[in-house]
Amino acid sequence: MTISWPDLVTSAAADGVSVLAKGADQDWSRDAGDLDWTCRQTLDHMALGVVGYAGLLIAQPADRYIALFASLDDQAPIPACLEGIRISATILASAVREAVPEVRAWHPYGHSDGPGFAAMGTLEILVHSRDIALTLGIDWTPPDDLCAPVVERLFPDAPTGHDPARTLLWCTGRAALPGLGRRKEWQWYGDVR
């Protein structure tokens, strides 16, 4: 089955936003999961990262990050901020759709292509949506069908034989797997392979 990387990004955003909307009326000034960022700051990080990946893919720098930073209005209500996550995912999906296969752009974890940046954006959305959901008391695990391509693309040395969502959470230091303790440090592999 061929993966539609643009659809993966927008599907992750739709799922994450749908889950987080259930807690829109809660206190978003609390830390998200085990992060040192509040739920609100984590949401902003998601938007900034996903738009940043689109910008990298469009600008194609060889050795630096881009100067464009897109953040959410810190005075906007949570539902409007959640809309911003869907918008950022759509921007990245469009950039991935437009990028020719030969496009490469710098990222500190490796020069990547459209599918690589789509995987990075999907990871940011899924993992950070879960971080926020934990704090809001919403029981949610990212869908396996969205996690599997991300694990395959960004974590070539990931352990096998586990559910894709649990594997992604282990790869990003958020959960243990049977026989494998929780990672204290982690990094994805962004280079095209």
Image: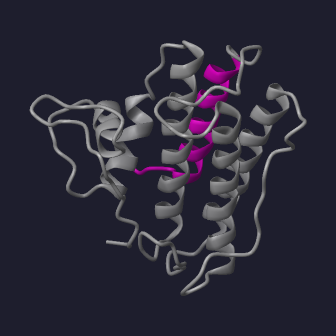
User: Residue 63's quadrant in the figure?
Assistant: bottom right
Can residue 1 be seen from the camera position used here? no
Residue 168 x/y as whole percent: 34, 40
Given residues 32 and 10, the one toward you in this image is 32
Instruction: In the displayed orientation, state which residue is furthest to the bottom.
Output: 62
Residue 135 vs 1, above or below: the answer is above
Q: Residue at x 48, y 38 (%)?
A: 127
Q: Is residue 77 above or below residue 114?
A: above
Please give the name of the residue rendered at 65% of the width and 48% of the height, measured from the top-left corner: 45
Residue 15 placement (x, y as % from top left): 59, 28
Q: Residue at x 40, y 67 (%)?
A: 190
| Residue 39 placement (x, y as % from top left) | 64, 31
Please name the predominant secondary structure of the magenta segment in the image: helix
Q: Range of the magenta residues?
A: 1-21
Q: Residue 171 appears at what percent x and percent y?
A: 30, 45
Q: Residue furthest right?
A: 75
Instruction: Name the residue: 48% across, 46% down.
Output: 123
